[in-house]
Amino acid sequence: MIEFKNVSYSYNVVDADGNAVDKGGVSNINLNIADGEFVVLTGGSGCGKTTITRMINGLIPHYYKGTMSGTVKIDGKDISERPIYETAKNVGSVFQNPRSQFFNVNTTDEIAFASENQRREPVDIKMSISETASSMAIERLLNRNIFELSGGEKQIVACAGINVLSPDVIVLDEPSSNLDFYAIERLKEILQNWKAQGKTVIVAEHRLFFLRELADKLLIMQNGEIVQELDKEKISTISSAETEKLGIRPLRLDDLKAEFQHREQSDITITLENFCFTYSDGEHGIDIPELEVPSKSVIAVIGHNGAGKSTLARNICGLEKRFKGVMRYGKKTLKNKDRLHNCYMIMQDVNHQLFTESVKDEAVLSITDKSLSEEEKEKKALDILSQLDLNEYADIHPMALSGGQKQRTAIASGLASEKEVMIFDEPTSGLDLSHMKQVSDELIKLRKLGKTVFVVTHDLELILSCCDRVVRLEKGTVMENYDICENNISKLKAFFGKEAM
Amino acid sequence: MEIGVCSNKNGAFIKLDPRSKLLLLITISIIMIGARTVEVEGVLRLICAAIPLVLLLSIREYKASFIYLLLLGSALICEKHIAPYTHGICNIVLMMICGLITRFVAGYMMGWYTVKSTSVSEFITAMERMHCPSFISIPMSVMFRYFPTLSEEYKSINDAKRMRELGHPFSQPLTYIEYILVPLMMSTVRIADELSAASLSKGLSAGEKRTHICEVSIRPLDVFAITGTMVMFVLFLVY
């Protein structure tokens, strides 16, 4: 039994000017979660759902600095009075970012890690590991280097660690945000299993469709408060139109509609020729003799993890030096180096591509046109920022921005460099409904500006809201390449599994 | 750099305790740097040069062993048969390079083997057996864990930089460093923060004892390695 009684919390952070301020958190939470209950927390970014998960696993108040009032109790014991390693005995956690939640490099060591910390007998742990491995069918993931695994595989390893520890309560903070549909399917099976074992499961999530059959309770949060609660019956019947009104991502995908308003095809095509590339491991790569797509449109690149989507994106950008393929854009033929000039990628982690001290500088830096004076460059940069609603942040340090604003700053620098082709690598992973829509609006805007946009994505909602074309990769080859129209919707949905049909 | 990836591979036919690896590492480095090339010390050097080779082969690092053999071999040949025929600056430079290679490469390879064949948890276990306090062993193991993360982050940042056509390493070295270091620090600070939160929530705690599933124990082979190194060390000191 987990009890929140009048809980308020705010983080003590330092703002862009170096002043200490209180930010975010939750206010006045009263919540009871019964043993064996499956609770889903959702709501916009910064609504406080992650804060709640941190209060259950004890990271608040023991790790994050902030001001807390009220009490959180698990089985009658106050979280703030128990050291975090005591809480860890009963509460297992899975985090959003698979890159940063592993202490070990070897997968088996990592699966054993939490149990080792609880001083369980090694023989005992080993037995649990082999049981878990066979029940989850992950024998092939044992004794591997974590850095070789895909995001989905990493999340499964994290879940396996929890299975071995077998705590009563499990909290998951946006576990699906880096996963493809296949991996989400696996995650769902694992969650189903935990539910069947009578564990108390708390999931903070934006993408909800895979939780429809599992959730006993869905809590919608806003500005740190729980504003609405849906019960099991409502969860299983609610339509996409209704969830949209509530401002959350859909609980079902089968009734999603595509928007066909923005088609107006350009007759110039882009052809990728001889896009063949193998990584040095000899296994992964792409093998695309020819791929033709319309220019000035939004092209979704889909496929399972490891199908070659990122490799394709990297090679479109010209990032692999020994790559021989060419891109024909109308009459132009672009080789590797030319593509580096003409293509621009917005990376999944935009933090990697922001280099300067202000948003404006970020755009100015990308203006490579040498004929412009400094003032003209500045003016052009401000123009671009206003197109993307960034002008009020022109002088702010990019790192002080929110995730969506950072992404738009990266888009601004792409626009400033006047590159014709923009590539987005999973732009909506971990985004809530309103931010997902914002991204979709931006993609449509880019298309109107005459850019060709490739979007590598696992997000069916995004594809339906803004893409014109779908390229499906499987094992490095193009399986399908079609326009999104009435006739093809079922083909698209079929890829996203039975949930979407 | 990949750490600890070979430790549990079934292929390794020599398994050493991290403690014997450390001891070997220290002894090999001292003898290779300090010993002369003649008489007993010459033999000691030969043995010390052979140990990393055998160990590298045992974890199936054929490429690394080949490079090691090639480097050491060519340096030795150069030292004996080419350098004596040169004069002046050329002679000094050649002797210096060869000297550096023959003296340091064995220690370096042994270090590489140690890092590559020891998993993070084996390392912590061994440190604990040596009664090393956990406030030293845990940060050190996190450091190990960090190298591959750094290289992953560096690759992405470098890609981003190339796409923006910024900062060439030779013509604009300062800009280059700034554009690599600033984002690298930003993202590693964030990852470090998330990593500590995740480790804490998995019950890692400095004051508490842990159990270990990895088998770290002194086996006959370790006894052999340890006595062997002791004998070599004594011989080195005596002669």
Image (spheres, coloured by chain):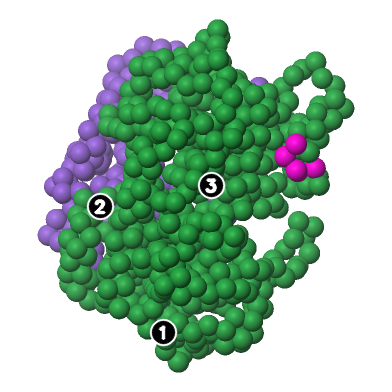
Spatial CA distance of label 3 from label 1 is: 33 Å
The CA distance from mark 1 to mark 2 is 34 Å
Q: Residues within 10 Å of mark 1 (few under 14, many from 20)?
A: few
Q: Which chain is assigned purple?
A: B
**What label does residue A452 carry, if any?**
none
Taking the view exactly as shown, the residue that stands out farthest to the right is A375
Q: Residues within 10 Å of mark 3 (few under 14, many from 20)?
A: many
- Quarter of image, res A112: bottom left
* B176 horizontally vs A424: left or right: right
Percent coordinates x, y for residue A297 in the rendering: 56, 27
Residue A295: percent from left, percent from top:
55, 21
- For the residue pair A241 and B6, the one nearer the viewer reads as A241
Residue holding disc 3: A428
**Start-end of magenta stretch:** A387-391
User: Which of the labelled discs sits on residue A34, or is there none?
Assistant: 1
Amino acid bearing label 3 = Thr
Tag 3 and tag 1, C-beta contact below 8 Å? no
Q: Colour of chain A?
A: green
Residue named by callout 2: A141
Residue A295 to residue A110: above or below: above
Q: Nearer the viewer, mark 1 or mark 2?
A: 1
Closer-to-camera residue (A270/A115): A270
